[in-house]
Image (tube, rainbow, N blue to C red):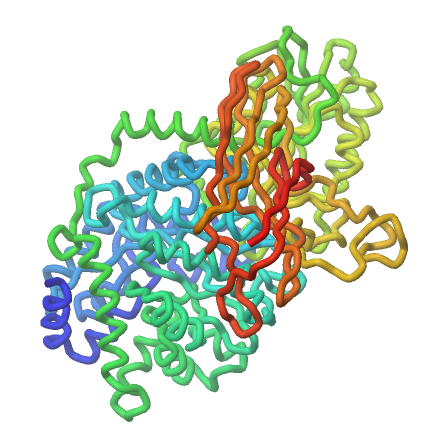
Amino acid sequence: MIEKRISEIISNLSLEEKVGQLNLTGRSPVGGADVTITDMEQMLQMGKISQEEFDSALQDVTIDSQEDDVAAGKIGGFLGYIKPNIIRHLQQIAVEKSKSGIPLIMGLDVIHGLKTVFPIPLAESCSFDDELFEQTAAAAAKESWNIGIDWTYAPMIDIARDSRWGRIAEGAGQDTYLASRYAAAKVRGFQGDDLSKNGNIASCAKHYVAYGACEGGVDYDAVDMSLQKLWNVYMPPFKSAVEAGAVSVMTAFNDLNGIPCTANSYLLKDVLKTQFDFDGVIVSDSMSVEECVAHGYAVDRKDAAGKCIDAGLDMDMHSRCFIDHLCELVREGTISEEVIDEAVRRVLRLKFRLGLFDNPYRDINAVNDPVLAENNRKLAHRAARESIVLLKNNGVLPLLKKKKIAVVGSLADMPYQMIGTWAREDLAIKPVTLFEGINGRTECRYFLDVSEFEAQKENFDFVVVAVGENRAESGEAASRAYIGLSEEDKKLIEIVKQTGKKIITVLFNGRPLAIPEVVEASDAVIEAWHLGLEAGSAIADVIFGDYNPSGRLTVEFPNRSGQTPIYYNHLKTGKPARDFKFSARYQDTSYSPLFPFGYGLSYTEYKYSDLSVVVNEDNITVGVTVKNTGDMDGTEIVQLYIQDVVGSIVRPVKELKGYKRVELATNEEKRVEFIIKKSELCFYDNELNYVVESGEFKLWIGHDSTATLCSEFIL
Ligand code: BGC
């Protein structure tokens, strides 16, 4: 039915109007601001105004210079507007003034919340909580829908093994299995069961593909890898997102094996559209069509437009190469009009799925929904608690008795640093800081100047030290060669250490940090990432024992910057790392990570016993008894790893194949069961056959990736 309507619409469009649908443009506001946009851009470049000030100034203007283009049907959608009245105004032009009346699609990067900011994705992934992944996406979708947004550019599902890459903050970490479950949950959350229902928005799985494997962790750099590695490690989250119903996919900036992903017909046509049977929209990343010229893969912008559309790209974000050149390319016979029609069909299908043809103006009455705001705040609190990972505790935590606490470190009281890499200061509700969180519960003083604390140290029992990264230090274009602490933060810890007080270090960061000295110097270390709205309250819950920490690392922490990439599921080597020179290791640091994958402490102890493994026709059933043997209720994240002992190609030393959050009161025990389908043991061999090979498998179950409770089975 819809397909028929789409065909009818396409048959009535001119070539120009068709190409217009493929043009996703940014804001270009002109009216209402005191200075011109060009002047503002210059001021931004010269550092006279911040990116935030620039963005917020642009949001206040009311007229977009492209309004005539909207009326002429030359624009398919906008990215970046957040004011409902402007969104409505532009939509009215498209629907009421353009000849075709096709509504615009309104996009925005809503990655970890809009007004209610949730923990950054890397943090949230540490909860190992699929239900949470889904709920925070659904909450963000509702808030976005309420201001007129149809389409988010999330989830980001790039596997990131190299912590130098700043964008590690935006995804679910280094594990393919976890990221695949995360991908599906996020798609379900954003899109709901019916995209056209109020409160649901389109998701966009990005960045397709292998963006996190950029050489040396340098953002935007080249990626060259075997196809079996691509398929075994980087592709599964995208397959999972598509299977969960993701209606769009964004291409990555990088090239893959010499061909920019945005112009890569193997990736876009052969894999995504044919093999995965994906019928949604493939959109470029910002400017990545034009960047084919800088890659040296296209002669000029026109050549880039032709190569990308021919490779299977549907929509051009920001570069205007499509709108400037596709008509010409069709008229001269370089590109067939059917190729354009196919891309237009996909864009219109997305607009139909969103219900835009029936209800282009959406219901923006619900903008300030107090119930939604209250529920989302509660969800943000839960998400922040579950994302925290307790890295060290020599017994100081939890602080159950009243203590006098000094708080130091600038990050301890900077609310908007808590919103992390993608959230927007102009929209985010002001977060609770660490100092505010602690101050509500006990006698506490915040010292911005550490020397003042030194002078009064006798008045305090404990020092909470906030160190790490501000929110701009991770995320896009934030790669770093050195991932230790800044000299300033190191000095701070040194000064506090000299006071002889007990130190609780709280880390705010968007990537694993190489900080063995800090761990050594501290009595307790809390990994708090950038936790969003309820950051301070959630950390205080952990400090005072109102919440028993349950988060586990989804990326390994290196001992030194040079030890990254470091990941638990590396391939087996002929000389496995050990205390011996001629083995796969650096000579100047440990061969183990500072903290392994899956690691995280709790205030209680969990005991594992009675591991059972039964091999059935189609699956393997694994059971284990887990008991809370300590004196605090808690949630254990039970993790299951396997090893395919001998393969036709070299296989990883270990791979996560199951996890479950299990709530256990003190002394309670539960039988936990996993059913692993045999197909989940498949891998891609060097001919890209997806096979499960018979032979021996090892299996571990326990608290983290170093679990020792072990069994084996034969397939
Ligand atoms: C980023 C994308 C983002 C896009 C639009 C790009 O620079 O790589 O992740 O969705 O901008 O804002």
In the rendered image, the vertical position of residue 689 relative to residue 195, given as above or below: below
Residue nearer the viewer, 275 or 646: 646
x, y percentage for residue 614? 52, 41
x, y percentage for residue 461? 73, 12
Position of the N terminus by quadrant: bottom left
Query: Could you tell whether 208 is left or right of 656 in the image?
Result: left
Could you say which quadrant of the image residue 213 lies in?
bottom right
x, y percentage for residue 86? 24, 50
In the rendered image, the vertical position of residue 77 relative to residue 378, given as above or below: below
Residue lying farthest to the top in this orientation = 402
Query: Could you tell whether 302 is left or right of 214 in the image?
Result: left
Question: Residue at coordinates 13% horizontally, 57% vertically from top-left?
Answer: 357
Residue 93 visible in rendering: yes
Question: Residue at coordinates 17% horizontally, 66% vertically from top-left?
Answer: 71
The quadrant of the picture showing ligand 1 is: bottom left
Residue 54 visible in rendering: no
Residue nearer the viewer, 141 or 463: 141
Residue lying farthest to the right in this orientation = 581
Question: Residue at coordinates 40% horizontally, 67% vertically from top-left?
Answer: 284
Query: Could you tell whether 622 is left or right of 698 in the image?
Result: left
x, y percentage for residue 96? 10, 60
Query: Could you tell whether 438 is left or right of 458 in the image?
Result: left
Residue nearer the viewer, 133 or 510: 133
Position of the C terminus by quadrant: bottom right
